[in-house]
Amino acid sequence: MSSYTRGAPTVFFINSLWLLLRLVSAGVRADSDPGGFVPFLGGNYDGHPMLYFSREDVEGLQGAALNSHRLLARGIREAAEEMLERPEDYLPPWSPAQFSARWNEIYGNNLGLLAMFCLLYPHRAGALDMAREYMERMAAQPNWLVKDAPWDEVPMAHSLVGFATAYDFLFVYLSRSQQERFLQVIGNASHYMYEKSYHRGWGFQYLHNHQPTNCVALLTGCLVLMNQGYLQDAYLWTKQVLSIMEKSLVLLQDVVDGSLYEGVAYGSYTTRSLFQYIFLVQRHFSISHFQHPWLLQHFSFLYRTLLPGFQRTVAIADSNYNWFYGPESQLVFLDRYVLRNGSGNWLAEKIRENRVQDGPGQPARGQRWSTLHTEFIWFDPSLRPTPPPDYGIPRLHYFEDWGVVTYGSALPSQRNHSFLSFKSGKLGGRAIFDIVHLKKYSEWIRGWRNFNAGHEHPDQNSFTFTPGGVPFITEALYGPKYTFLNNALMFRPSGHHSCFAPWEGQVTETCNSKWLKFKQGQAADCQGNIEAVLEQQGLVFIRGEARSAYSQELKARSIQRNLLLLQPELLLVVDHVHLRPDSPVRRFSAFFHNTDTPFQTTAMDNIQGAFIQHSQDSYKMFWLDDTGSSEKAATGYWSYPHGYPYNGSNYVNVTMPLRYPHTRVAYIFFGPEVEVQSFSLRGDSERIDVYLATHDHTYTVHLLTGEAPSKPLFAMVLEDQKKKIVFERAAAIQERPLVEVEEYVNAVEDNLQHVKPVFQQLERHIQAKVLDSGKFQKTDKRKPAASVKKTFSLSKKQKAKGGKKGGLADGPLDIFAQIEAREKRQKQTILKRGGYEDVPEENDGDSRAFIDYSDTRRVRKGAVIKGRRFNEVQAVATVGVSHSSSSAYIRLFLIFNILTFFLLLAVLLLRLPKAQTLHTQRCVYCLLLVDSFILLCLYSSCSQSQC
C-alpha cells in the first residue's frame, strides 16, 4: 500500500505551493492595477483623498508626473502657472452680484485643475494659498446659480463637482475651520441639488447632457459627505442619483452604435460626467458598466466623426467646431477600462498634437482645463499608442441609431483626403424615437416628456463636404433652429403658419425659441430615413428620405436626396421631389452653408454656380434641373440673434420651380484638383441620368428614383464608358427592431442594492468607534457621540420590538431600511396632495412624468447643518470613518491559516512517511485540503474588503 502513496507528499507539496504562488501573484496584479481594473473600496476609507484615489496613491501620482505622465503633467502645470501669474483673472469674485451675473461654470471647471496641481506639486509657492482663497470665495456666495437663469442648476453642478473634488484632494491642507465650513457648503449645495432633482427636467429626461452633469455633481458631494460621516442624507441622495443614472444606462443599451443624439460637441459634455459616474460607482459601490454595449462602441463616435487633420468634427446639432469637453480624458478612459488596445491613447495624442490654439476650433476659456485632472488619473502609460487597423484608409461608417453617415474620417490633412457626412434620422435617434412611439419601458417612460431633443436641428437630409481637407459645405453650428441653416430644403407656398411664410421648412423648426420643437403635433413624429449606404470600387453612394420631416400639408410622396462621391474632390448631389396631385407647393429652395468663408457667384456655359476662395484655390459648385434650367442663386450672410455663441453663417440659396409629379435638381461640388468640362441631365418617371465630364474622366450616372423601379438597383455609374459600378437594392439598409432590455426594472434595482452594504459598513465603523471611545467626544467639535449613541440605542430597541414580531431580529441593525420606509410614506403623502410643483425651465419639463413612476425618495427631516449663507440642509451628523475592524480580523485569520498550512506541510513531509496506518495519512490529507479551502475563502474575503 505504501508504494502507492510514497510520492504523494512531494506532489501535493508542489501543487499546493504553485497554487499559493498563483494567489499571491494575482493579489499583486490586482493591487498594482496594471489594466482596466477599478478596485472596490467597500466603504473602507482612510480619510481623504478618496474619490478617485486614496492617500497612499498620492506619492505614486507625484512620481508619475515626473515620468510616465510627464506630458499630461506639463499641461496641468502650464494651466496652473497661468492661473498663478494672473490670479485676479481666474479667482471667483467675492461679490455675489458679480459671481451670478453671467454663466459661471468656469469657476468649478478650473478648481479641479488647480487642486490636482497642488496635489502633484505641493511645494509650489503660492499654489495652495490660491486654492484655499479660491474655495473661500466660492464658499462666500449665497448660492452658485446664475441670476438670469435661477431655474438652471447646471452652473451650480459645475461649481459643486469642482468644489467637492478640491475638498477631497486638498483636505489635509485645509484648516479645521475650513474643513468644517467647506463641508457645510458641500452639504447645502448637495441638498439643493437633491430637492431640485424632483422638479427639474434633468431628473427625468434621460440621455440629456444636463442629467449626468447634475447627477455626478450630486454624487460627488454625497461621497464626500459620506466619508465625513453624514450617512443618512448621503444615503438618500446617493440612491436618488443612482436611480436616475442607472435608468439612463439601461436605456443607453438600445443605442447600438455608440452615438449620442445631441451630437459630438454636446456628446463630449455628456461623457465628461458619464465616465466619471461609471468610474465612481465601480470604485465606491462595485457597480460595473465597463462591458456596457454602448461603451464598447463609443470609440467609433469619436473616431469616425473627425475631419481630416484631427481639428474639427461633424457639427450636427448644437455644436462648436469640435468638442465642448475633452475628448482626451474620455479617450484615455476608454482605452484603460474598455478597449485595452492603445487606440484611445493614440487618438488622444493626435488630437493633443493638432489642437487649434488660436482661431476657430480653439477650446473655450471656461472649458479647456476641466478634464485635465481626470485625463491624468485615468491615463495608462502601459498602453502604447496604436492607431486602429484601418487608419489611413478612407472608410464609410453608418451610425444606425443616430442616422448619420461619415466617409473619410480621422485622416491626415492631405490633398486627396476628403470628408463627407450625411444626416437623415429619427428625432432623438432611433432608440429614443422608438421607445417613445412603441411605448417601451412603460414603467419609466411617458412619451417625449422623458427626453429632451432641444439641442437637435431641423436637419434631415443634410450633408457636409470637405474636399482635400478644406471645409466647403459645412454645418451652421450653434444657432437658431431654422431649416435653411442646415443645408436642407424649404418649400412654398406654406400650408400653415411658418417662421418664414410663405416658405416652410421641417416640422421641428422653431420661430421664437432657442430649442427645437419636438414634444407635440407633427414635430413629435419627425423622422428621416437613410435607405442606402454603399461603397463600390472607390465610389460612395448614400440615399436619404425626409418626407416625414415635413408637414403633411405639403402632400409630398417623396423628398429624396442622393449623394454620389465620384472622386475624392468631386461630389454629385441629386434632389428628387415627388408630389401628389393635390399638392399646393410650387417652388423649393436649397441652402448650402460655410461658416468661415463667403460664397461668390459664377457661371459655366449658362449653368449657374457659386464658389469659395481658400488661399489660392477655388472650390466650386454648379446646379441644373431635369429640364436643363439653372436659376441664379442668392448669396449672403445670415446673422444670428443675440445670445448665440456664433455670429452667423455664409450661405448660397438655390431656388427652383417644382413640377408635378417629379422634379429633380442635380448639384456638383468639386475642389481645385478637378476641372469640370460639361454637365447635363435628363430623366423620366423612373430615373434620372446625369452626364459629367472632367479633364480626366467621363461619368454617366443612372439614378433610379421611383418607388417601384423596374430594375433592382439604386444607381449605376459608367466611368469612361468602360468601367461599370452598380449599387444594388439588395444591399439596402435594414433597420433592426428595438428590443426592450429584459427585466429592466430589476436590473436597476439590483444595482441599487449595492449601495446599502457600503453605508452599513460605514455605519459599523462609526458605531464601533463612537461606542468604544469616549475620547473622540473631546476632539470633535460637533460632539456627535451622544446623538449617535441615541440613534443606535433607539434602533436596538426597535430591533428588539421587531424581533417579537418576526421583524428585524433576524438581521443586523438597519437604520437605512427605516429611512427608506419613512421616505416612502412621505412620498405617498406628496402624491396624494397632487405631486410636486411644476417649475418652469428651458424646455418646460413636466415633473409629473417623473414622480408617476419614480422609486426614489424625497428629503426627510433631521438635524440641521447651518451652512455659510446657503439654504439650510437637513442631515444627521455622525463621525469620520476608518478601516473596518472586520478587515483586520480577516487579515489575522489569513496569516494564522498560512502558518497552519505550512505546519501541516511540514508534518506531511517529515512525519507522514513514518505513519504506520493508512488512516493517519488520510487524516493529514483531509486536514490539508480543508485548510486550503479555508485559505482560499479568506483570501477572497480579504481581496474584496481590500484588507
Image: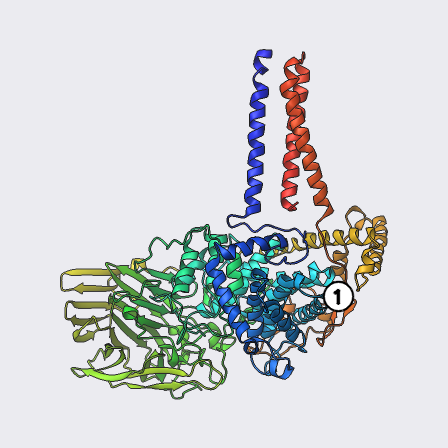
Total of numbered circles in the picture?
1
The residue depicted at 82 percent of the width and 52 percent of the height is 773
* Amino acid at dot 1: Ala
- Could you say where residue 796 lies in the image, as x and y percent from the top left? 84, 52
Residue 252 shows in this picture = no
- Identify the image quadrant of residue 828: bottom right
Residue on which disc 1 sits: 875
Relative to 173, residue 557 above or below: below
Query: Which of the two residues, 906 or 632, is positioned nearer the viewer here?
Result: 906
Query: Which of the two residues, 797 or 45, is positioned nearer the viewer here?
Result: 45
At numbered mark 1, what does the secondary structure look like: helix, strand or loop? Answer: loop
Relative horizontal placement of residue 311, taking residue 809 as reference (left or right): left
* Label 1 Cα neighbours within 10 Å, binned few <14 / some 14-19 / many ≥20: many
The residue depicted at 37 percent of the width and 55 percent of the height is 387
- Could you say where residue 218 lies in the image, as x and y percent from the top left? 63, 66
- Identify the image quadrant of residue 395: bottom left
